[in-house]
Every structure is written in C-alpha cells, then in structure tokens.
Image (cartoon, grey):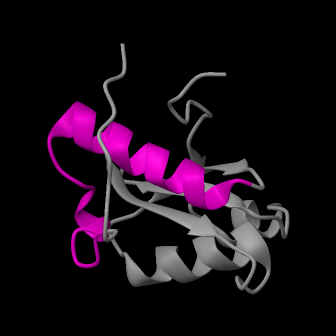
Amino acid sequence: MAIRLEKPWLPLSADAIRLLPAELGVFELGDEAGRILYIGYAGGRSLFGLRGEIERSGAAMPAATRFRSEVTMQYLTRHQELLMLHVADHGALPPGNRASPPPRLGRLSPL
C-alpha cells in the first residue's frame, strides 16, 4: 500500500460529493494547482461520513476546488499519517490544518 493518497482529484462539486459513500475515512482538499489545502477525516460522529465532512469542509474553504478521499476504518491513524507525510514533504501542515494542529504529531521519513 502506498503511503501517499494517490487517488485522482475530483471536482469539489455537489454532483461529485453526492456520489461519495457515507463511510469512515480520510480526505484531502486541494486547489486548482493540486496543492493540498486541508487534510480531514470522517469519524464515527461524522454526519453522513465522508460525504458530509467533505461538503462541510469544502464550504468552509473557498479556495478548495477539488478533493480526493479514501475509505478506511483506521481514519485517525491514517489522518495523522497523512499530516506527518505533508510535514515531511513540505515542512509544515497544510494551511487549513494550521489553526488547530493535532496535540502530538510524530515524524515520518518517507523514502
């Protein structure tokens, strides 16, 4: 399994969001250039799972024009893994995650 979320970007549109499952998982919101603006997750208390969280997060982030997601039961671990990977690749959290960083974020050294 690849550590990076390598699924293709989808347009952040009502039609694309409507097709998402109401499942647990992680997602990334990006801009037109494919830069990751926010990494989020749909957990056990998320209304309508990935569908609801992507819709809510996308509405709060006007610069986001696309998204990609991954269904996983280990959403908290995978969320932290994606955040650590972003820090390893870019030296900082995505802009949308900087206001409320996780309390403890480990280090990841991808090859």
Q: Is residue 34 visible?
A: no
Q: Residue at x 82, y 65 (%)?
A: 23
Pick the residue in front: 88 or 66: 88
Query: How many numbered marks does the figure carry?
Result: 0
Whether 6 is among the magenta residues is no
Residue 22 placed where, x, y %? 84, 70
Residue 58 placed where, x, y %? 49, 73
Residue 20 placed where, x, y %? 79, 61
Where's the N terminus, which quadrant?
top right
- Whether residue 48 sits left or right of residue 98 in the image: it is right
Q: Residue at x 25, y 32 (%)?
A: 89
Q: Residue furthest left?
A: 91
Tell me which corner region of the image, top left, top right, bottom left or bottom right, holds residue 99: bottom left
The region drawn magenta spans 74-101
Residue 98 placed where, x, y %? 22, 69
Whether 93 is among the magenta residues is yes
Q: Is residue 87 visible?
A: yes
Q: Is residue 69 above or below residue 4?
A: below
